Image (cartoon, rainbow, N blue to C red):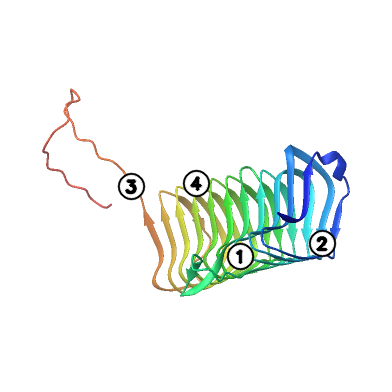
Amino acid sequence: FSGIGVYGSAIAYENLQILNNQIDVENYGINYICIKSTQMASNLINSNSIRAGQVGISLSNTMGSTKITDNNITTSHTGIDLFSSVAIIDNNNIRGVCDDEQCSKVSFTKVAEKGIRLAKNSEAEILNNFITNYYTSMDIQQSETGMLYKNELNFSYYGISSNEANIEIITNYINYTNSAIDIEDTEIKINNLIINSFETGIYAFNSSLDIEAITLQDGNVCIEVIDSTYSITSYDNMDCIEAKLYEKYFFNVKIQTNEGIVASQHNFQFSDF
């Protein structure tokens, strides 16, 4: 099932180091499954070469201090997967390779599914990683990234996709993507993000955006916000064919009498002030 499996209580795995292994498996390369959300003390996964049919490195219910650093990971589905877990993910090379007929496609090219996935109250610092050839480079669901720093996300449909998340982005690069950032019910802070070659730079629904510095080049729509609040320091480095910003809000209009009886037909006008 796994190249290396770590199961059970965290007490047996204090200070565990998984170093310099060559792993080539059909399912999971390195798989941590704890009995419940358990504090892992000083675990290190470093300098491994992993080729996996499903997931390169997976942590489930693994809290505490786990460092995932300097690994070369090639997968057909997900590179690094965190579920109710905490980790530092630093300086990994993560590549997707998928040859099946069921593979997702980006620009007619087959890709794997997710480079890094955070789910169900996971927390991670994600630093200095190179991720390429995934449908979604980073997928963040009901989780938090205290820092996304100096990552390069290359060739994907979604660069970063999130729902019910809290994200801070500092000095990252997203290249060759349909939607570089696609967020819903998310709070996001951006400082020094560079996005090149895209259809939509940032798409936000019911979210909050604080953008200090951003560069968007060779795209169609730079930013589209729907039912969201935002602060953008400058639009100077936005180069998009159709628009720098689309802003939309949805609302319901209820027309009734003073007694609360809904009018079946009533003429009204809406003015854009």
Q: Amino acid at mark 1?
A: Ser
Question: Is tag 3's residue or tag 4's residue first in the polypeptide sequence?
Answer: 4
- The picture places residue 240, in percent across and down from the top left corner, at 43, 73
Question: Is tag 4's residue or tag 1's residue first in the polypeptide sequence?
Answer: 1
Q: Nearer the viewer, residue 90 or 49?
A: 49
Q: Is residue 50 above or below residue 265?
A: below
Q: Nearer the viewer, residue 162 or 78?
A: 78
Q: Secondary structure at mark 1?
A: loop
Disc 4: which residue? 185
The dot on residue 46 is: 2
Q: Is residue 61 above or below residue 25?
A: above
Q: Give the residue drawn at x 54%, y 53%.
A: 162
Question: Is tag 1's residue or tag 3's residue first in the polypeptide sequence?
Answer: 1
Question: Is tag 2's residue or tag 4's residue first in the polypeptide sequence?
Answer: 2
Q: Amino acid at mark 4?
A: Asp
Q: Residues within 10 Å of mark 2 (few under 14, many from 20)?
A: many
Give me the C-alpha separation between circle 4 and circle 1.
29 Å
Give me the C-alpha separation between circle 1 and circle 3.
39 Å
Q: Amino acid at mark 2?
A: Asn
Horizontal side of residue 132 vs 227, given as left or right: right
Q: Amino acid at mark 3?
A: Phe
Give me the C-alpha separation between circle 3 and circle 4.
15 Å
- Frontmost of labels 1 and 3 is 1
Give me the C-alpha separation between circle 2 and circle 3.
48 Å
Q: Give the residue drawn at x 58%, y 70%.
A: 133
- Frontmost of labels 2 and 1 is 1
The dot on residue 76 is: 1
Disc 3: which residue? 250
